[in-house]
Amino acid sequence: MRSDHVHHLLTRIGTSELPLTHAGLDAEPPGRHVEHLRSILEHHGLLEPRDHYLSLFERWLSNKLTPIQDTAIRQPVEHFARWHHVNRIRAMHNEGTSRSRGPVHSAKQEITETLKFLNWLNLTHGKQLSACTQQDVDEYLADGPTTRQLIRTFFVWADRAHVKDGIVIGHRPARTTPAMTQDDRLASIRSLLTGDEQNRPYRVAGVLLLLYAQPLVRVTALKVDAVVSTSSGLGISFGSDPAPLPEPFANLVRQHLSHRPNQRVANADSDWFFPGTRAGKHLHPNTVMIRLRNLGIDLLGARNTALRQLVTTAPPPVVATMLGYSAQVAHLHAAAAAAPFGLYATSAPTKAKP
């Protein structure tokens, strides 16, 4: 309220000079004060909630495509961006899924790489997309960085949308899979369970990563009602069935729920498990990521090791159902860990026909 920018913004809203709409706020020069006010207005029902990352993505897309004069390059990329990515991310928001940050990041990368390819195709071979051949694509992929492989999604969409068929790009396998030793994983869990009070929210997030292989994007988007009471004690829901919360971690979770951070006036009634500094928003995954890295946690290695450990102690479909992973991902980690349950049936056996 003391900031001149905030005072000017509120004065213009009060005099109706600035419409109290998303479009009105979008027309303002970007700034933290604008987004903070937007969050408060959404949280209290004065503005319709919208997907923050989707709105940023649509603005980015417009700025990315507007300068492109060649319609043969701009048009297929725009159709790909809007029909595939924007529609998919908007559907996630309508379904109540708040984790659009990752899909938006991936979409930007795929759109950028597709534009690079179409520009290369035009400058190197004088061709438009309609004349592109498999040989052109293979040449492009063979003579450049691995990020070029990201054009695969565009050609999969182009084939399904009947924009361009006949181009096949295989999946690029990861060269390495980061991991940590089981001893290091257990040592990290012990360290987080006994850390200081100031870092309690980040300690809880870290244990959720180390125990249940939960990515931070999913951890930060948990809500309070994810923690449930079961017949055997406290549990937490990532998938269809709650996973048990063992002691002493269960006690740490209780302490966190009683002293959640950022419980200010604007966010006092938040239902987020990790409330953020903005009204109605949860902690940003990057905030947690940076704090955990400062605590010495190897994030990707921790998740891979946790998941592989879990699929060696229970059938992959059971792990997948409990932790919110696909059965395919669980089986891949089971195979990598040489788990004895690698061939466990993914569904109940059918009765033999008489």
Image: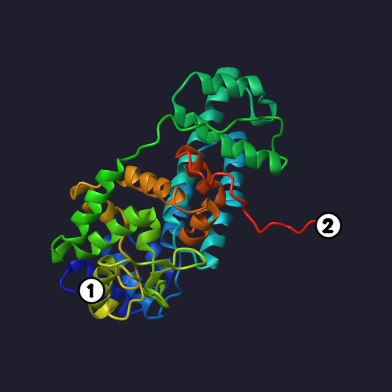
Which of label 1 and label 2 is nearer to you?
2
Of all residues, the one furthest to the right in this rendering is 354
Q: Quadrant of the C terminus?
A: bottom right
User: Is tag 1's residue or tag 2's residue first in the polypeptide sequence?
Assistant: 1
Q: Quadrant of residue 255?
A: bottom left
Question: What residue type is disc 2 on?
Answer: Lys
The answer to whether residue 324 is left or right of residue 83 is left
Task: In the rendered structure, find residue 310 and report the number of the disc placed on it.
Answer: none
Q: Is residue 135 visible?
A: yes
Q: Is residue 194 above or below residue 168?
A: below
The answer to whether residue 112 is left or right of residue 265 is right
Q: Position of residue 136 (x, y in %)?
A: 61, 21
Question: What residue type is disc 1 on?
Answer: Gln
What is the C-alpha distance between the residues marked 1 and 2? 55 Å
**Observer-nearest residue: 351 or 44?**
351
Task: In the rendered structure, find residue 353 and report the number of the disc placed on it.
Answer: 2
**Observer-nearest residue: 223 or 350?**
350
Q: Is residue 281 above or below residue 318?
A: below
Q: Secondary structure at mark 1?
A: helix
Q: Is residue 214 visible?
A: no
According to the image, label 1 marks what residue? 255
Q: Quadrant of residue 191?
A: bottom left
Q: Secondary structure at mark 2?
A: loop
Q: Report the residue at 41% width, 80% height from top.
A: 45
Q: Report the residue at 52% width, 51% height from top.
A: 316
Q: Position of residue 174 (x, y in %)?
A: 45, 33
Label 2: how many Cα within 10 Å (few below 14, some 14–19, many 20+):
few
Label 1: how many Cα within 10 Å (few below 14, some 14–19, many 20+):
some
Q: Report the residue at 66% width, 39% height from top.
A: 158
Q: Position of residue 192 (x, y in %)?
A: 21, 57
Determine contact: label 1, label 2, CB under 8 Å. no
Of all residues, the one furthest to the front in this rendering is 354
